[in-house]
Image (cartoon, grey):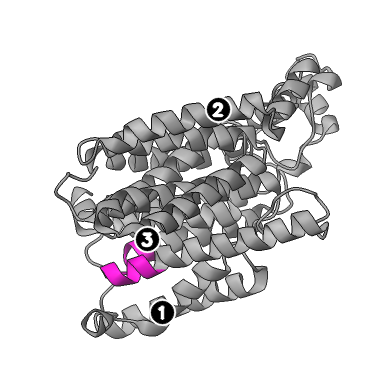
């Protein structure tokens, strides 16, 4: 153990990254401070070591374009409001993933980072359940304190569920009975908590994610796929049989002929904004400025009809894709699409071999979970921002930092 500890090149930097992972779902100010100090320590350490993480590659270009797109949109945005703050938010999670990708962290450091994410999520859920059962939480819904809204919490939990399942699958045959039991308990906690959020999109994607991870493990170990199919079937049956909250929510919306919970009207607002400002959108974090009056004027200018009952105002689009089109236009959407497409292609091309290390499988599973949840839940909720955006970018960066993946670039 001491020999491995000596491999830590930048102990203060690593400690700040660990602190960030602990604070991420728990407390706001310490999380932001840890992020800022980590960035400063990273830059100072690379300047002193004269080592910025190797040669520039395709992923570096993608990260750079991703960050730049937010500020380019801010300069030319159609509406004025919080567009610069939105660009800062994009840069915050993109820069985190970029720095981690070039960080050169060792296997032990990576395990610490992933472990910190799991521990902080378990602690956050414990506090969330206490607030829920004690009545201290105003929303009466399960929430991770620093993540906030139940939909955002569900997205974060779904990604963490993928990490925990990947860790269990990667290490199962190397663990004893006690560690296996603990891993299964944490997996169950994540899945049950996901169901408690009653977020239909996140729950559906989470269950499908379990099957996808088990299928990905098929060349290495076939038992997980059989167990996952049985588990998903039993869970689905239990949800329907006992009419869990998510099923009641779906039934109520269906009875009210509002299965999408007004998302169709929200999306029409976003599409109208994109049609008005097709290249750079209304500006990041300016979706809430899109009002019925503005949409009416845009439609009138274009010679189109406007029926206010078909449009619903919302702080965001409840869709990663509509939100990106409306706020960033074609320019910003292209940068986002390039990242997501490159991420998917890399996952397919660089999936680990059966003989690869457990850590390689774990990191691939974490990156795959972040991509699948981001893109899947992104159909009906605005993913890849704030805490779950930071989490997804961190997992992408950790996976890209592995030598095999970097060679693929």
Residue 338 in percent (x, y) is at 40, 40
Q: Is residue 219 above or below residue 20?
A: above
Q: SS class of the residue under badge 1?
A: helix
Please give the count of numbered marks on the rendered protein: 3
Magenta stretch containing residue 106, yes or no?
yes
| For residue 308, side relative to residue 97 (left or right) | right
Q: Which residue is mark 3?
A: 179
Query: On the picture, is 249 further left or further right than 293?
Result: left
Mark 2, residues whose alpha carbon is within 10 Å: few (<14), some, or many (≥20)? few
Q: Which residues are magenta?
A: 98-112
Marks 3/2 in contact by CB < 8 Å: the verdict is no
Question: Which residue is rendered at x = 30% and y = 60% of the image?
Answer: 176
Report which quarter residue 291 is drawn in.
top right
Residue 366: give x, y in percent of width and height: 38, 50
Q: Residue at x 66, y 36 (%)?
A: 318
Residue 13: give its label. Answer: 1
Q: Nearer the viewer, mark 1 or mark 2?
A: 2
Q: Secondary structure at mark 2?
A: helix
User: In the rendering, which numbered label is found on residue 236?
Assistant: 2
Q: Mark 3 vs mark 1: give the one in front.
A: 3
Give the Cα distance between marks 3 and 1: 29 Å
> Sequence order check: which comes first, mark 3 or mark 2?
3
Quadrant of the drawing holding the N terminus: bottom left
Query: For the residue labelled by badge 3, is the local secondary structure a helix, a strand or a loop?
Result: helix
């Amino acid at each position: 153990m001491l020999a491995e500890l000596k491999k830590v090149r930048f102990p203060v930097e690593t400690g700040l990254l660990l602190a960030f992972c602990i604070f991420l779902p728990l407390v706001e100010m310490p999380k932001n401070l840890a992020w800022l100090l980590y960035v400063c320590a990273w830059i100072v350490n690379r300047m002193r070591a004269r080592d910025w993480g190797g040669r520039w590659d395709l992923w570096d270009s993608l990260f750079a374009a991703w960050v730049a797109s937010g500020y380019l949109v801010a300069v030319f945005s159609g509406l004025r409001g919080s567009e610069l703050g939105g660009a800062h938010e994009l840069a915050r999670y993109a820069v985190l993933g970029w720095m981690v990708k070039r960080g050169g962290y060792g296997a032990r450091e990576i395990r610490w980072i992933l472990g910190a994410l799991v521990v902080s999520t378990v602690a956050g859920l414990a506090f969330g359940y206490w607030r829920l059962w004690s009545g201290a939480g105003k929303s009466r819904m399960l929430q991770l304190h620093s993540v906030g809204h139940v939909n955002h919490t569900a997205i974060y939990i779904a990604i963490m569920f993928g990490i925990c399942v990947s860790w269990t699958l990667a290490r199962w045959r190397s663990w004893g009975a006690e560690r296996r039991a603990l891993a299964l308990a944490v997996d169950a906690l994540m899945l049950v908590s996901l169901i408690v959020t009653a977020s239909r999109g996140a729950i559906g994607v989470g269950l499908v994610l379990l099957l996808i991870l088990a299928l990905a493990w098929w060349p290495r170990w076939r038992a997980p796929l059989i167990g996952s199919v049985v588990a998903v079937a039993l869970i689905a049956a239990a949800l329907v049989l006992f009419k869990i909250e998510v099923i009641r929510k779906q039934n109520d919306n269906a009875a009210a002929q509002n299965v999408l919970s007004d998302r169709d009207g929200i999306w029409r607002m976003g599409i109208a904004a994109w049609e008005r400002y097709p290249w750079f959108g209304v500006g990041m974090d300016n979706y809430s400025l899109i009002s019925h009056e503005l949409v009416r004027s845009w439609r009138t200018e274009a010679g189109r009809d406007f029926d206010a009952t078909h449009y619903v105002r919302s702080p965001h689009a409840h869709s990663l894709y509509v939100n990106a089109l409306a706020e960033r236009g074609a320019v910003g959407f292209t940068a986002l699409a390039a990242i997501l497409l490159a991420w998917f292609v890399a996952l397919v091309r660089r999936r680990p071999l059966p003989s690869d290390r457990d850590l390689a499988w774990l990191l691939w599973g974490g990156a795959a979970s972040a991509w699948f949840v981001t893109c899947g839940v992104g159909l009906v909720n605005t993913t890849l921002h704030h805490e779950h955006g930071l989490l997804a970018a961190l997992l992408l960066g950790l996976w890209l930092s592995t030598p095999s993946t970097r060679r693929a670039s």
